Amino acid sequence: TACVVAASVFTLWFEYRDGAKPGDWKRVAIYLEANERPLQPIAVFPADQAMPLGRYYHGTNQLIPLPHAVTFEKFTIRERVLQNQAQISAAFTPAQRRAPEIWLVRFDECTLAGVDLNCPALDRFIRQHYRVQSSRTFVGTQVELLQRTDGR
C-alpha cells in the first residue's frame, strides 16, 4: 500500500508540477488579451484546440482554427491534418491574409490518435511568409507573434 501511495503522489507531482495541465488555455487567453492589438488574427493549430481556447479568450481578434473549423456532424481525425500550405492560407480571409502580424497558438502534440497532423507543413509556411517576433511557452502550448515578411 505504501508503494502504491508513493507512486501515486509522485505521478501527481510529475503531471501537475507546473500548476497547470497541457493546454493551459486560461493562461494562454490572458497572455493574448494582454499583448494583442487590433487586426492581429489568432491562428490555432490543431483546429480542435480553438474550442477550449475560445472558452477563455474574450479579446478583440478572431480565432482561426487550422486547417479549418471543426464540424460536429461526423468526427474524422484526418480532417485535422494539414494537407499543404495553400490550405493554411485559405483558412484566413483576404483581410486576415494581409495582416502584418498574426498570433500562432500551437498545441505541442503533432499526432492525434496515431495520425500525423503534418506540423512540418505549418513550419514551412511560417518560414516562407513570417518572422517570429516573440514566443512564449505554456504547459503544452507555444504562442508566437509572427510578422509578415513576404509583403503579400
Image (spheres, rainbow, N blue to C red):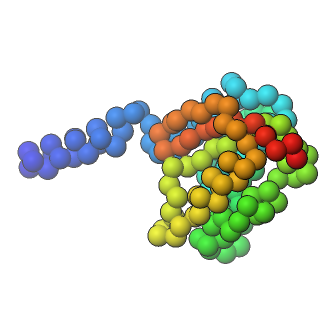
Which residue appears farthest toward the left when viewing the image?
A: 2
40 above or below 1? Answer: above
Which sits in the foreground, 3 or 62? 62
Name the residue rendered at 41%, 33% in the picture: 19
Which sits in the foreground, 124 or 38? 124
In this picture, residue 14 sits left or right of residue 54: left
Q: Is residue 39 visible?
A: yes
In this picture, residue 22 sits left or right of residue 15: right
Q: Position of residue 61 (x, y in %)?
A: 80, 38
Which residue appears farthest toward the top when viewing the image?
A: 34
Q: Position of residue 131 (x, y in %)?
A: 70, 38
Q: Quadrant of residue 89?
A: bottom right
Name the residue rendered at 66%, 36% in the picture: 132
Q: Quadrant of residue 86?
A: bottom right
In this picture, residue 23 sits left or right of residue 61: left
Q: Position of residue 33 (x, y in %)?
A: 70, 29
Name the residue rendered at 47%, 39% in the picture: 139
Name the residue rendered at 48%, 68% in the picture: 113
Q: Is residue 42 visible?
A: no
In this picture, residue 23 sits left or right of residue 54: left
